[in-house]
Image (tube, rainbow, N blue to C red):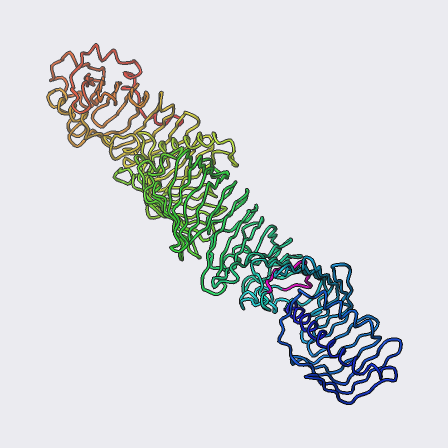
Amino acid sequence: MIKTSAIFSAHAIHVLLRNTIILLLVLFISLFMWLFAGIKVDTLKVGDFNVGGLYIKLDKKLTLMTDYVIIPESKEELSFEDVDRVFDTIKTFFTFFEYIELKHVTFDNNHLNIIFTDDILYVTSNEFEIAGNIHRVGETFEADISMLHLVKEKIDIKGKLIYDLSTEILNTKGTFDAYDIKGRFTANKIADTVDFKIDSDTFSDLHPIIDTFDLNEAVNSWILDKVEAEEYKLLSLSAKANVNNGQFKMDIDALRGEILFSDVKIHFKEGLEPVLASSFLLSYENDRLYFDLKAPTYKGKKLEGSKVSIVDLTENNITLHLDILTDTPFDAVIRNLLEAYDLKIPVDQKSGTVKAHFLADIAVMEDYSDFVVDVNFTQGEVWLDKVRLSVVKGGLHYEKGFIDINHMVLKDSAYHGELNGKIDLNNTKADLVFDAKSIKLKSDEGTFFTLKNKKLPFVLTYKRDIYVGIPDFAMRIHSTEKETKITLKDLSKIKPYLPDPGPLEKGGNVTITTKDFMTYTFKGVLQRPSCFLYEKNKACKVKVPFEGKITPKDTDFYAFGKRFYYNKARSRVKLTKLNIDLEKFLKSQKEDNKKGKKSKKSKVKQGTKLLILGKHSNLRYGDHTLVMDSYDIDVKTNGDIKAIGSSSGDIIKFSKKKDVFSIQALRIKDKVLHPLIDFNGLQEGRYSLKSSGNLEKTMKGEIIVEGGVMKDFKAYNNTLAFINTLPALASLQDPGYSTKGFSILEAVSEYRMIKRDVIIFDSIYIKGSSATIVGKGVVDLKKKTIRMDLAIQTARELGKVVGSVPLLGYILMGKDKSMTIGLKIRGTLDNPIVTTSAGKEILRLPLDLIKRTFESPGQLINQPQ
């Protein structure tokens, strides 16, 4: 617009000066004679020229003044072909005048005032004021414009103009002061083409410059409203135009511009804090505005290298293009920035940094946007929604509603591998694959899960709650704002990755719940191939329903409707109406401790003293079973045990030290004895038992019997049947040796058990009301055979009838008229065969056994225990 005013001014001045000179020549010729005296004419009309208040005088040079001048319009076109002739004429004309002042010159609807003095021409009008001089050097005109003031635009220009007659090239340069902006300009005209360039000093208001361009309202808003700066500086503004037939047409393609903004705030999005920058360069080129930011930051986050541009300014699809770079943690600040553009990327980085690249195309005039985000992680802690990841490196790529996770290497003390996959943000679903190099999960007791070189696909959804499904483990994770629930539907799926599958050998299921990942509750069912817990019917509990709670300081574990309870802090197990096989339990503990010791990084001492409390619970150890009302068992860290129990007031003590097992029972009832020795042929009465040794080698023991009967087992029944065939022993049936059982007054037996397979009875002494029995023998439990030699002595009272019995080879007569019969029991336990033995074979029994027939067993019973 400035150039247009200047071109118009040059044209008007040229025509005005030419017509004025014609007028002056006419006046000069007509009035020359009166010049020396000075001539004053109120009105003068020459042709179409009207002059009022004319005054002219000749001193050394002429002085000319008028009150008004009316100059007719010219129909001639402006031409530079005879400019040299016209200039020479004008220049020669002005040499005759010392001073010229023409007021109110009316020409072509313009009102001018013209003053010429000291070789300087002043022209003023309602639209402009101009002052300067011009001179010719050869074929070149040079003009010094000391003032050009455009009244309406409030623009002041100073400069020089050079016009080459031979080439018709016009060059100008100078300074300007417009809109409180001071600067410099250069302009050149070659043929019909004009090009110019402008720069400025710093200024504080950009509106006047931007308002001179016909920009889209949204673009204007971006430059003027969304960008705040303390000061501006026009570094350059260059353009080209075509002047043809008086028309000035700008070449938009050639327009270039650069403005420096200092101390900048850029409001990219409503609701977000502004991006701050020490400065940025606003450039215009090829229908685009470029924002080149220097040291930009957003909420303290560095955005170095970020750029902004607005493209297609002259089209209807004006687009804002954002190219944001950052090297900072991907935290809530960056996440909120993306969410302002409806980009909800569920990532939060707690440590480390990312190199993020955010690309956006946002339509200025339409409701359209397109985004691309690239994030490259360095080593640090990253949360994918509520899932913690220890990232070594890797990247995320967002485009068109999808996030691609590319080669994200994860490494922690618990896992190492590479994560890949795709997240569908519109459907809040992720299909991911973790290529695990290793997964190792540990507790204070050691490593409990190990996996190597396996790809694990899993699915994650997070619309409201978070769901994670891992098919290979039959695992499902459900996380809400209040709690997280982990369900393992088939525990056998994870069995291959457990160093000790233990209770998971046959699978099961479990559900684990936590609200803070510090305290956990769990509930499920275990399927076990073997166990150490059983019911009264001795059925092993391979299906174990369980539940419990884990806190940072303790663990509570319940099973079988809380009949089994384990407390870790107290290292205590409570059993109620539930039986335990202590040998299997200790074996399990021993194996766990061995595996625990292999863990070099375990933070606690392997093995912990354990207290087992039983109530209405039977206790089994090998072939021994104790039927208890209650018991206490101390299990030492080295596997030794010390226990005491009671049953109906009867006390039983047992212990294990290294490989030596000992048991003591004093005057217990038969219901306690039967499961203890796995033999129910002794009934009623009271029984004292003492046994010790190595169960895997040799156990030595002794049983003392007080009262009761012996009956209802194969060896007894077959012996009874055999005795019934012997007339000499018919008297034993009543009341001592009969179907009602053999009544025992007192008895004692010493035995050895070899490897749990063979029982060697070193001595047997049983005193009954009708007979006394001594003997020895072997029972092979593995082969289920018996080999027993017995001597049965009738009571002395029976000697009265012995005289009528013929003496046989298997009968020995005592001095006291007693009668001793030898029996041999051979065969299987299911069907032992009883026969008599020769008298001499009876004598082969150890002397101490024979002696026992004449000694009171009370002496044995009363021996110190």
Most extreme residue toward the bottom, as rendered?
Answer: 42
- Which quadrant of the view contains residue 279? bottom right
Say how many tags the image has. Answer: 0
Magenta segment includes 187: no
* Residue 755 locus on image (x, y percent): 32, 21
Q: Is residue 38 left or right of residue 147?
A: right
- Which quadrant of the view contains residue 482? bottom left
Between residues 858 and 497, which one lies in front from this camera angle?
Answer: 497
Q: Quadrant of the C terminus?
A: top left
Between residues 443 and 772, which one lies in front from this camera angle?
Answer: 443
* Residue 40 locus on image (x, y percent): 82, 87
Q: Is residue 633 among what the camera can see?
A: yes
Q: Is residue 747 left or right of residue 131?
A: left
Q: Is residue 125 left or right of residue 804?
A: right
* Residue 751 locus on image (x, y percent): 31, 22
Instruction: Determine the residue positioned at 38% across, 44% down.
Output: 458
Q: Quadrant of the N terminus?
A: bottom right
Kindly report the secondary structure that dominates the magenta region of the rendered protein: strand
Q: Is residue 577 among what the camera can see?
A: no
Between residues 272 and 601, which one lies in front from this camera angle?
Answer: 272
- Which quadrant of the view contains residue 721? top left
Between residues 691 and 117, which one lies in front from this camera angle?
Answer: 117
Residue range in magenta is 228-243
* Residue 539 locus on image (x, y percent): 26, 38
Q: Is residue 127 above or below residue 660?
A: below
Most extreme residue toward the top, as rendered?
Answer: 840
Q: Is residue 167 above or below residue 540?
A: below
Q: Is residue 415 above or below residue 350?
A: above
